[in-house]
């Protein structure tokens, strides 16, 4: 029998692109285009809708894995970096975001798109502390630091 926490769903909501925390439900707008830092670019580039879905699917998979294993949840909840923007907004990200970036890069690779190099950009420039890295839950073939 399938538990409702294991059913992945996409819900259309204008202007949205996020997974509801602790669930496998993603709110998304098919017209959303995000400018993201990718390999081979000094700045950010628009990412296609399919990549946004792949990124959010990574969050859903992380949610299911975390619900099934306290050890995995502890890893995913481990702090990754903190960033304070010029206007004082503080962002705290955990390793789930890095896991999800590696998952996204798997699909970028399949679609022959440049790999994403960083999680965040500020004024169109990648924030260095948000550089994607490989680790125990990610595959080193997805990101090439050269």
Image (cartoon, rainbow, N blue to C red):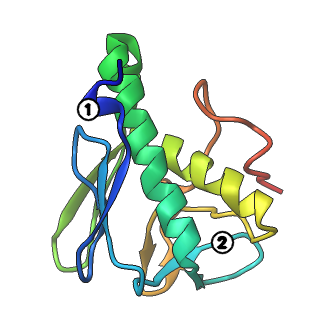
Q: Secondary structure at mark 2?
A: loop
Q: Residue at x 60, y 84 (%)?
A: 45
Q: Residue at x 75, y 71 (%)?
A: 113
Q: Residues within 10 Å of mark 1 (few under 14, many from 20)?
A: few
The answer to whether 80 is drawn above or below residue 30 in the figure is above
Q: Nearer the viewer, mark 2 or mark 1?
A: 1
Place of residue 78 in the rendered image (x, y in percent of width and height, measured from the top left): 35, 30
Q: Secondary structure at mark 1?
A: helix
Image quarter where the N terminus lies is top left
Image position of 77 (left or right of 90): right
Q: Which mark is residue 4?
A: 1
Which residue is more in the foreground, 28 or 74?
A: 28
Quadrant of the rendered image containing residue 95:
top left
The image quarter in which residue 37 lies = bottom right
Question: Which residue occupies 59% across, 47% down?
Answer: 103
What residue did someone put label 2 on? 38
The residue lying furthest to the left in this view is 88
Q: Is residue 141 left or right of residue 108?
A: right
Q: Position of residue 102 (x, y in %)?
A: 61, 47
Mark 2: give few (<14), some (14-19) or many (20+) Cα within 10 Å: many
Q: CA distance from mark 2 to mark 1?
A: 35 Å
Earlier sequence position, callout 2 versus callout 1 = 1
Furthest toward the front, the residue is 1
69 versus 141 height, above or below: above
Image side of residue 52 versus residue 117, left or right: left
Q: What number is the disc on residue 129?
A: none
Residue 95 appears anywhere in the view: no
Where does the C terminus fall, quadrant-wise?
A: bottom right
Q: Is residue 57 visible?
A: yes
């Amino acid at each position: 029998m399938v538990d409702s926490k294991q059913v992945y769903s996409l819900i259309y909501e204008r202007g949205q692109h996020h997974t509801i925390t602790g669930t496998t439900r993603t709110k998304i707008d098919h017209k959303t285009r995000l400018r993201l830092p990718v390999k081979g670019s000094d700045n950010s580039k628009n990412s296609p809708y399919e990549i946004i879905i792949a990124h959010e699917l990574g969050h859903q998979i992380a949610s299911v894995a975390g619900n099934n294993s306290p050890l995995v949840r502890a890893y995913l909840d481990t702090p990754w970096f903190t960033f304070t923007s010029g206007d004082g907004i503080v962002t705290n990200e955990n390793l789930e975001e890095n896991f999800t970036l590696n998952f996204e890069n798997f699909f970028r690779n399949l679609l022959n798109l440049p790999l994403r190099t960083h999680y965040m950009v500020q004024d169109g420039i990648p924030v260095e502390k948000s550089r994607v890295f490989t680790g125990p839950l990610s595959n080193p073939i997805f990101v090439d630091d050269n």
